[in-house]
Image (cartoon, grey):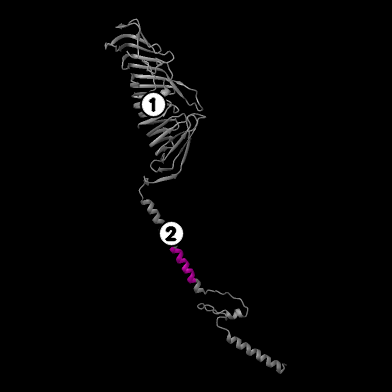
Amino acid sequence: MKTGRETLLSAHLLNLAIQFSDALPYSVVMNTSATEPTGDHSVSEALGLWEPKRTLTLEMARRHSARIKLMRRVLIGGAVVLSALVIWQFASQPTGFDLPDNPEDSVRMINPRYSGRTSDNLPYYLTASEAVREAEKTNAVKLAAPVLEFYRAAGAAVSKVVAKTGVYNDIDKVLDLSGDVDLNTDDGYACQTSQARILARDKAIDGNAPIACQGNFGTVNGNEYAITDNYKRFVFKGGMSAVIERDAALAGSSASDGAGNSASLGFAGNSPIDITAEEARYEDALTTLIGGVTVLQDGTEITSETMIIERAKADKNVGDSLKLGEITTIDARGDFVYITPDRRVSGDRGVYEREKDIITVTGNVKLVQKGSSRTDTTVTGNRLVYNLATKKAEFGQDCTGDDCGRVTFGTGQ
Protein backbone atom coordinates (compact mmCIF):
# COMPACT_ATOMS: atom_id res chain seq x y z
CA MET A 1 0.00 0.00 0.00
CA LYS A 2 1.42 3.26 -1.06
CA THR A 3 2.22 5.94 1.36
CA GLY A 4 0.98 9.44 0.90
CA ARG A 5 4.36 10.59 -0.32
CA GLU A 6 4.46 7.94 -3.06
CA THR A 7 0.90 8.69 -4.07
CA LEU A 8 1.75 12.34 -4.45
CA LEU A 9 4.87 11.53 -6.51
CA SER A 10 2.91 9.29 -8.87
CA ALA A 11 0.28 11.89 -9.42
CA HIS A 12 2.97 14.43 -10.17
CA LEU A 13 4.67 12.19 -12.75
CA LEU A 14 1.37 11.44 -14.42
CA ASN A 15 0.66 15.13 -14.65
CA LEU A 16 4.08 15.76 -16.30
CA ALA A 17 3.46 12.99 -18.83
CA ILE A 18 0.12 14.46 -19.80
CA GLN A 19 1.67 17.91 -20.19
CA PHE A 20 4.56 16.49 -22.33
CA SER A 21 2.10 14.61 -24.50
CA ASP A 22 0.09 17.73 -25.11
CA ALA A 23 3.27 19.62 -26.04
CA LEU A 24 4.35 17.17 -28.81
CA PRO A 25 3.63 18.42 -32.38
CA TYR A 26 1.56 16.42 -34.76
CA SER A 27 4.49 15.39 -36.88
CA VAL A 28 6.09 13.32 -34.10
CA VAL A 29 3.17 10.97 -33.92
CA MET A 30 3.25 8.14 -36.46
CA ASN A 31 1.74 9.59 -39.58
CA THR A 32 -0.07 7.18 -41.76
CA SER A 33 -1.40 9.87 -44.04
CA ALA A 34 -0.21 9.64 -47.63
CA THR A 35 -0.77 13.28 -48.29
CA GLU A 36 1.18 15.20 -45.61
CA PRO A 37 4.92 15.16 -44.95
CA THR A 38 6.41 14.91 -41.55
CA GLY A 39 7.01 18.22 -39.92
CA ASP A 40 9.35 19.61 -37.32
CA HIS A 41 12.23 17.43 -36.04
CA SER A 42 13.32 19.77 -33.30
CA VAL A 43 11.77 17.77 -30.47
CA SER A 44 13.35 14.50 -31.52
CA GLU A 45 16.67 16.24 -31.91
CA ALA A 46 16.26 17.72 -28.41
CA LEU A 47 15.64 14.25 -27.04
CA GLY A 48 18.64 12.83 -28.91
CA LEU A 49 16.44 10.67 -31.10
CA TRP A 50 17.36 9.92 -34.75
CA GLU A 51 15.09 10.01 -37.69
CA PRO A 52 15.61 10.91 -41.42
CA LYS A 53 15.86 14.63 -41.98
CA ARG A 54 14.45 14.35 -45.48
CA THR A 55 11.66 12.05 -46.29
CA LEU A 56 9.32 11.85 -49.25
CA THR A 57 5.75 10.90 -49.37
CA LEU A 58 4.62 8.32 -51.89
CA GLU A 59 2.99 11.02 -53.97
CA MET A 60 6.20 13.08 -54.14
CA ALA A 61 8.17 10.00 -55.19
CA ARG A 62 5.70 9.34 -57.94
CA ARG A 63 5.91 12.90 -59.17
CA HIS A 64 9.75 12.72 -59.15
CA SER A 65 9.72 9.49 -61.14
CA ALA A 66 7.36 11.03 -63.65
CA ARG A 67 9.68 14.00 -64.13
CA ILE A 68 12.69 11.69 -64.68
CA LYS A 69 10.80 9.67 -67.28
CA LEU A 70 9.76 12.87 -69.07
CA MET A 71 13.32 14.19 -69.15
CA ARG A 72 14.59 10.83 -70.43
CA ARG A 73 12.05 10.83 -73.23
CA VAL A 74 12.95 14.42 -74.16
CA LEU A 75 16.71 13.64 -74.29
CA ILE A 76 16.22 10.46 -76.32
CA GLY A 77 13.95 12.31 -78.72
CA GLY A 78 16.45 15.13 -79.10
CA ALA A 79 19.27 12.66 -79.80
CA VAL A 80 17.16 10.96 -82.47
CA VAL A 81 16.35 14.30 -84.12
CA LEU A 82 20.02 15.42 -84.04
CA SER A 83 21.20 12.09 -85.53
CA ALA A 84 18.64 12.43 -88.29
CA LEU A 85 19.85 15.96 -89.08
CA VAL A 86 23.50 14.85 -89.28
CA ILE A 87 22.64 11.91 -91.56
CA TRP A 88 20.60 14.20 -93.79
CA GLN A 89 23.44 16.75 -93.96
CA PHE A 90 25.97 14.16 -95.18
CA ALA A 91 23.50 12.53 -97.55
CA SER A 92 22.58 15.87 -99.16
CA GLN A 93 26.22 16.80 -99.98
CA PRO A 94 27.41 16.14 -103.58
CA THR A 95 29.84 13.23 -103.99
CA GLY A 96 33.51 13.96 -104.81
CA PHE A 97 33.51 17.44 -103.29
CA ASP A 98 37.00 18.85 -102.78
CA LEU A 99 37.84 21.93 -100.81
CA PRO A 100 39.82 24.20 -103.22
CA ASP A 101 43.28 25.35 -102.20
CA ASN A 102 43.66 28.98 -101.39
CA PRO A 103 46.62 30.31 -103.40
CA GLU A 104 47.10 32.97 -100.76
CA ASP A 105 47.81 30.38 -98.08
CA SER A 106 51.50 30.22 -97.22
CA VAL A 107 54.02 29.29 -94.58
CA ARG A 108 56.52 31.95 -93.60
CA MET A 109 59.91 31.14 -92.05
CA ILE A 110 62.49 33.49 -90.57
CA ASN A 111 66.22 32.80 -91.09
CA PRO A 112 65.72 29.40 -92.76
CA ARG A 113 68.66 27.10 -93.49
CA TYR A 114 68.82 24.35 -96.12
CA SER A 115 71.65 21.93 -96.71
CA GLY A 116 72.56 19.24 -99.19
CA ARG A 117 75.39 17.50 -100.98
CA THR A 118 76.73 17.79 -104.49
CA SER A 119 77.26 14.95 -106.92
CA ASP A 120 80.82 14.54 -105.61
CA ASN A 121 79.53 14.42 -102.01
CA LEU A 122 80.64 17.90 -100.98
CA PRO A 123 78.29 19.89 -98.72
CA TYR A 124 76.50 23.11 -99.57
CA TYR A 125 74.41 25.42 -97.40
CA LEU A 126 71.62 27.82 -98.34
CA THR A 127 70.40 30.50 -95.94
CA ALA A 128 68.07 33.51 -96.24
CA SER A 129 66.57 36.24 -94.12
CA GLU A 130 63.07 34.96 -94.88
CA ALA A 131 61.37 32.12 -96.75
CA VAL A 132 57.75 31.75 -97.90
CA ARG A 133 56.26 28.47 -99.11
CA GLU A 134 52.97 28.85 -101.02
CA ALA A 135 50.25 26.21 -100.91
CA GLU A 136 50.08 25.91 -104.70
CA LYS A 137 53.86 25.38 -105.05
CA THR A 138 54.76 22.79 -102.45
CA ASN A 139 58.22 22.10 -103.92
CA ALA A 140 59.34 25.73 -104.18
CA VAL A 141 60.10 28.28 -101.50
CA LYS A 142 60.60 32.01 -102.09
CA LEU A 143 63.72 33.46 -100.45
CA ALA A 144 64.70 36.95 -99.41
CA ALA A 145 68.44 37.76 -99.40
CA PRO A 146 69.56 34.18 -100.16
CA VAL A 147 73.19 33.11 -99.61
CA LEU A 148 74.58 29.89 -101.10
CA GLU A 149 77.88 28.53 -99.74
CA PHE A 150 79.55 25.64 -101.55
CA TYR A 151 82.92 23.97 -102.13
CA ARG A 152 84.44 23.51 -105.58
CA ALA A 153 86.78 20.77 -104.40
CA ALA A 154 87.75 18.96 -101.23
CA GLY A 155 90.10 21.05 -99.14
CA ALA A 156 89.24 24.32 -100.91
CA ALA A 157 87.95 27.39 -99.13
CA VAL A 158 84.25 28.16 -99.30
CA SER A 159 82.79 29.83 -102.41
CA LYS A 160 79.68 31.97 -102.16
CA VAL A 161 76.73 33.31 -104.17
CA VAL A 162 74.47 36.07 -102.81
CA ALA A 163 71.40 37.74 -104.33
CA LYS A 164 68.41 39.93 -103.48
CA THR A 165 65.73 37.30 -104.06
CA GLY A 166 65.50 33.67 -105.06
CA VAL A 167 63.30 30.60 -105.43
CA TYR A 168 64.61 27.25 -104.21
CA ASN A 169 63.23 23.89 -105.30
CA ASP A 170 64.25 21.65 -102.44
CA ILE A 171 63.24 18.51 -104.34
CA ASP A 172 65.29 19.09 -107.50
CA LYS A 173 67.94 21.17 -105.64
CA VAL A 174 67.65 24.07 -108.11
CA LEU A 175 68.08 27.69 -107.02
CA ASP A 176 66.84 30.56 -109.21
CA LEU A 177 68.36 33.91 -108.20
CA SER A 178 67.54 37.44 -109.32
CA GLY A 179 68.57 40.98 -108.47
CA ASP A 180 72.25 41.85 -107.96
CA VAL A 181 73.64 38.31 -108.03
CA ASP A 182 77.29 38.10 -106.90
CA LEU A 183 79.47 35.00 -107.31
CA ASN A 184 82.85 34.72 -105.57
CA THR A 185 84.90 31.54 -105.82
CA ASP A 186 87.85 30.41 -103.74
CA ASP A 187 90.19 30.56 -106.76
CA GLY A 188 89.70 34.27 -107.32
CA TYR A 189 86.79 34.58 -109.73
CA ALA A 190 84.20 37.29 -109.06
CA CYS A 191 81.10 37.67 -111.23
CA GLN A 192 78.13 40.03 -111.17
CA THR A 193 74.81 39.51 -112.97
CA SER A 194 71.08 40.02 -112.48
CA GLN A 195 69.88 36.44 -112.96
CA ALA A 196 71.29 32.99 -112.26
CA ARG A 197 69.99 29.45 -112.21
CA ILE A 198 72.12 27.22 -109.98
CA LEU A 199 72.01 23.43 -110.12
CA ALA A 200 73.38 22.88 -106.62
CA ARG A 201 73.68 19.11 -106.92
CA ASP A 202 75.36 19.23 -110.35
CA LYS A 203 77.57 22.25 -109.49
CA ALA A 204 76.56 24.34 -112.50
CA ILE A 205 75.23 27.86 -113.13
CA ASP A 206 73.60 29.40 -116.20
CA GLY A 207 71.86 32.65 -117.00
CA ASN A 208 70.24 34.61 -119.81
CA ALA A 209 71.26 38.01 -118.44
CA PRO A 210 74.46 40.00 -119.01
CA ILE A 211 77.39 39.09 -116.76
CA ALA A 212 80.75 40.60 -115.86
CA CYS A 213 83.55 38.44 -114.43
CA GLN A 214 87.05 39.10 -113.17
CA GLY A 215 89.64 36.40 -112.63
CA ASN A 216 92.68 34.66 -114.00
CA PHE A 217 91.34 35.03 -117.53
CA GLY A 218 91.17 38.81 -117.11
CA THR A 219 87.93 40.78 -117.26
CA VAL A 220 85.12 39.28 -119.34
CA ASN A 221 81.63 40.53 -120.21
CA GLY A 222 78.95 38.42 -121.86
CA ASN A 223 75.25 38.76 -122.69
CA GLU A 224 74.58 35.17 -121.61
CA TYR A 225 76.66 32.65 -119.71
CA ALA A 226 77.11 29.17 -118.29
CA ILE A 227 79.48 27.96 -115.56
CA THR A 228 79.86 24.20 -115.56
CA ASP A 229 82.29 21.35 -114.85
CA ASN A 230 82.67 21.87 -111.13
CA TYR A 231 82.53 25.66 -111.58
CA LYS A 232 85.77 25.56 -113.64
CA ARG A 233 84.41 26.04 -117.17
CA PHE A 234 83.12 29.53 -118.00
CA VAL A 235 81.16 30.08 -121.22
CA PHE A 236 80.14 33.58 -122.35
CA LYS A 237 77.56 33.67 -125.14
CA GLY A 238 75.50 36.06 -127.22
CA GLY A 239 78.44 38.38 -127.78
CA MET A 240 81.36 38.88 -125.40
CA SER A 241 84.33 41.12 -124.74
CA ALA A 242 87.42 40.60 -122.62
CA VAL A 243 90.58 42.33 -121.48
CA ILE A 244 93.86 40.59 -120.61
CA GLU A 245 96.33 42.74 -118.75
CA ARG A 246 100.02 42.70 -119.71
CA ASP A 247 101.19 40.73 -116.67
CA ALA A 248 98.85 37.96 -117.69
CA ALA A 249 99.96 37.97 -121.32
CA LEU A 250 103.47 38.09 -122.78
CA ALA A 251 105.40 39.85 -120.07
CA GLY A 252 109.12 39.56 -120.79
CA SER A 253 108.80 37.66 -124.06
CA SER A 254 111.06 38.27 -127.06
CA ALA A 255 108.21 39.86 -128.94
CA SER A 256 109.69 43.22 -128.00
CA ASP A 257 112.57 44.64 -129.98
CA GLY A 258 114.41 45.80 -126.86
CA ALA A 259 113.77 49.46 -127.57
CA GLY A 260 110.27 49.41 -126.24
CA ASN A 261 108.70 49.01 -129.69
CA SER A 262 106.10 46.38 -130.50
CA ALA A 263 107.51 43.62 -132.66
CA SER A 264 105.42 42.72 -135.69
CA LEU A 265 103.03 39.78 -135.47
CA GLY A 266 103.49 39.46 -131.72
CA PHE A 267 101.77 40.53 -128.54
CA ALA A 268 104.06 42.86 -126.65
CA GLY A 269 104.12 46.27 -125.07
CA ASN A 270 102.53 47.45 -121.86
CA SER A 271 98.99 47.87 -123.16
CA PRO A 272 96.23 45.40 -122.34
CA ILE A 273 94.90 42.97 -124.94
CA ASP A 274 91.27 43.54 -125.96
CA ILE A 275 89.20 40.62 -127.23
CA THR A 276 85.72 40.43 -128.79
CA ALA A 277 83.83 37.41 -130.14
CA GLU A 278 80.38 35.89 -130.34
CA GLU A 279 81.32 33.25 -127.77
CA ALA A 280 84.19 32.52 -125.43
CA ARG A 281 84.95 29.35 -123.48
CA TYR A 282 87.43 29.42 -120.62
CA GLU A 283 88.50 26.08 -119.21
CA ASP A 284 91.63 25.89 -117.08
CA ALA A 285 94.45 27.43 -119.16
CA LEU A 286 92.60 27.09 -122.47
CA THR A 287 90.48 29.84 -124.03
CA THR A 288 88.38 29.17 -127.13
CA LEU A 289 86.93 32.14 -129.02
CA ILE A 290 84.22 31.51 -131.62
CA GLY A 291 82.61 33.74 -134.24
CA GLY A 292 83.97 37.06 -135.45
CA VAL A 293 87.05 37.00 -133.23
CA THR A 294 89.03 40.23 -132.92
CA VAL A 295 92.14 40.75 -130.80
CA LEU A 296 93.66 44.22 -130.39
CA GLN A 297 96.81 45.58 -128.76
CA ASP A 298 98.68 48.82 -129.42
CA GLY A 299 97.23 49.27 -132.91
CA THR A 300 97.85 45.64 -133.85
CA GLU A 301 94.77 43.65 -134.86
CA ILE A 302 94.20 39.95 -135.45
CA THR A 303 90.87 38.56 -136.69
CA SER A 304 89.66 35.05 -137.42
CA GLU A 305 86.59 32.85 -137.21
CA THR A 306 87.90 30.90 -134.25
CA MET A 307 90.89 31.34 -131.97
CA ILE A 308 92.39 29.04 -129.35
CA ILE A 309 94.60 30.69 -126.73
CA GLU A 310 96.68 28.63 -124.33
CA ARG A 311 98.32 30.14 -121.28
CA ALA A 312 101.00 29.00 -118.87
CA LYS A 313 99.93 27.38 -115.61
CA ALA A 314 101.41 28.32 -112.28
CA ASP A 315 101.53 25.99 -109.30
CA LYS A 316 98.12 24.88 -108.09
CA ASN A 317 96.98 25.98 -104.67
CA VAL A 318 94.84 24.21 -102.10
CA GLY A 319 91.58 23.04 -103.59
CA ASP A 320 93.03 22.67 -107.08
CA SER A 321 92.93 26.44 -107.64
CA LEU A 322 94.58 27.41 -110.92
CA LYS A 323 96.81 30.42 -111.49
CA LEU A 324 97.38 31.48 -115.10
CA GLY A 325 100.41 33.18 -116.55
CA GLU A 326 101.48 34.43 -119.97
CA ILE A 327 100.11 33.38 -123.35
CA THR A 328 102.09 30.46 -124.79
CA THR A 329 100.14 29.57 -127.95
CA ILE A 330 97.58 31.27 -130.20
CA ASP A 331 95.90 29.26 -132.94
CA ALA A 332 93.70 31.45 -135.17
CA ARG A 333 91.66 29.52 -137.76
CA GLY A 334 89.43 30.62 -140.61
CA ASP A 335 90.04 33.90 -142.44
CA PHE A 336 93.09 34.79 -140.40
CA VAL A 337 94.09 38.44 -140.82
CA TYR A 338 96.89 40.35 -139.12
CA ILE A 339 96.91 44.14 -139.51
CA THR A 340 99.33 46.85 -138.36
CA PRO A 341 99.72 50.40 -139.62
CA ASP A 342 102.52 49.16 -141.95
CA ARG A 343 101.41 45.75 -143.21
CA ARG A 344 98.59 43.25 -143.66
CA VAL A 345 99.01 39.47 -143.58
CA SER A 346 96.17 37.11 -144.36
CA GLY A 347 95.75 33.36 -144.66
CA ASP A 348 93.60 30.43 -143.69
CA ARG A 349 95.38 29.90 -140.38
CA GLY A 350 97.87 31.67 -138.15
CA VAL A 351 99.72 30.03 -135.22
CA TYR A 352 101.83 31.80 -132.62
CA GLU A 353 104.32 29.68 -130.61
CA ARG A 354 106.05 31.53 -127.82
CA GLU A 355 108.57 28.76 -127.09
CA LYS A 356 109.86 28.92 -130.67
CA ASP A 357 109.29 32.67 -130.93
CA ILE A 358 107.66 32.30 -134.35
CA ILE A 359 104.34 32.90 -136.08
CA THR A 360 103.36 30.56 -138.92
CA VAL A 361 100.68 31.53 -141.46
CA THR A 362 99.39 28.87 -143.86
CA GLY A 363 96.84 28.55 -146.66
CA ASN A 364 96.45 31.29 -149.28
CA VAL A 365 98.99 33.52 -147.59
CA LYS A 366 99.18 37.12 -148.73
CA LEU A 367 101.53 39.80 -147.38
CA VAL A 368 101.12 43.46 -148.25
CA GLN A 369 103.73 45.83 -146.81
CA LYS A 370 103.97 49.56 -147.24
CA GLY A 371 107.28 50.82 -148.59
CA SER A 372 109.12 54.08 -148.00
CA SER A 373 108.39 55.12 -151.58
CA ARG A 374 104.65 54.63 -151.01
CA THR A 375 104.81 51.55 -153.18
CA ASP A 376 103.33 48.50 -151.52
CA THR A 377 105.20 45.19 -151.58
CA THR A 378 102.94 42.18 -152.16
CA VAL A 379 104.03 38.59 -151.63
CA THR A 380 101.81 35.48 -151.82
CA GLY A 381 102.27 31.83 -151.09
CA ASN A 382 100.92 28.93 -149.09
CA ARG A 383 103.21 29.26 -146.09
CA LEU A 384 104.93 32.10 -144.20
CA VAL A 385 107.14 31.73 -141.12
CA TYR A 386 107.98 34.87 -139.19
CA ASN A 387 110.75 34.92 -136.57
CA LEU A 388 109.95 37.40 -133.82
CA ALA A 389 113.58 37.63 -132.67
CA THR A 390 115.13 38.38 -136.09
CA LYS A 391 112.04 40.05 -137.58
CA LYS A 392 112.55 37.95 -140.74
CA ALA A 393 109.74 36.35 -142.74
CA GLU A 394 110.34 33.35 -145.03
CA PHE A 395 107.96 32.09 -147.71
CA GLY A 396 107.86 28.61 -149.13
CA GLN A 397 109.05 27.55 -152.59
CA ASP A 398 105.69 28.39 -154.13
CA CYS A 399 106.16 32.07 -153.30
CA THR A 400 105.20 34.61 -155.95
CA GLY A 401 105.42 38.39 -155.95
CA ASP A 402 107.82 41.28 -155.67
CA ASP A 403 110.21 39.65 -153.20
CA CYS A 404 110.07 35.95 -152.50
CA GLY A 405 113.26 35.96 -150.52
CA ARG A 406 113.55 36.99 -146.95
CA VAL A 407 111.24 39.84 -146.05
CA THR A 408 112.36 42.02 -143.19
CA PHE A 409 109.71 43.70 -141.00
CA GLY A 410 111.34 46.79 -139.63
CA THR A 411 109.71 49.22 -137.26
CA GLY A 412 110.01 52.21 -139.59
CA GLN A 413 109.45 50.82 -143.08
Residue under the image location 44 percent in, 44 percent down: 109
Q: Is residue 108 left or right of residue 305?
A: right
The residue indicated by pointer 2 is 79
Quick one: 310 or 18, which is closer to the camera?
Answer: 310
Of residues 137 and 376, the one drawn nearer to the viewer in this rendering:
376
Mark 2 secondary-structure assignment? helix
Closer-to-camera residue (158/190) = 190
Quadrant position of residue 396: top left
In percent of width and height, residue 62 lies at: 49, 71
Residue sitting farthest toward the left: 374
Distance (Cα) linking label 1 and label 2: 76 Å
Q: Is residue 69 magenta?
A: yes
Mark nearer the N terminus (1 vs 2) = 2
User: In the picture, which quadrant includes the C terminus?
Assistant: top left
**Mark 1 highlights which residue?**
235
x, y (%) of residue 253? 43, 17
Quadrant of residue 39 in the image?
Answer: bottom right
Residue at the image point whose x is 39% and y is 35% from the top? 181
Residue bounds of the magenta highlight: 62-74
Residue 108 higher or lower than 69, as above or below = above
Crowd band around label 1 with a 10 angstrom C-alpha radius: few (<14), some (14–19), many (20+): many
Residue 287 on image: x %, y %: 40, 22
Q: Amino acid at mark 2?
A: Ala
Q: Is residue 70 above or below residue 230?
A: below
Quarter-wise, where is residue 348 in the image?
top left
Residue type, mark 1 in image: Val
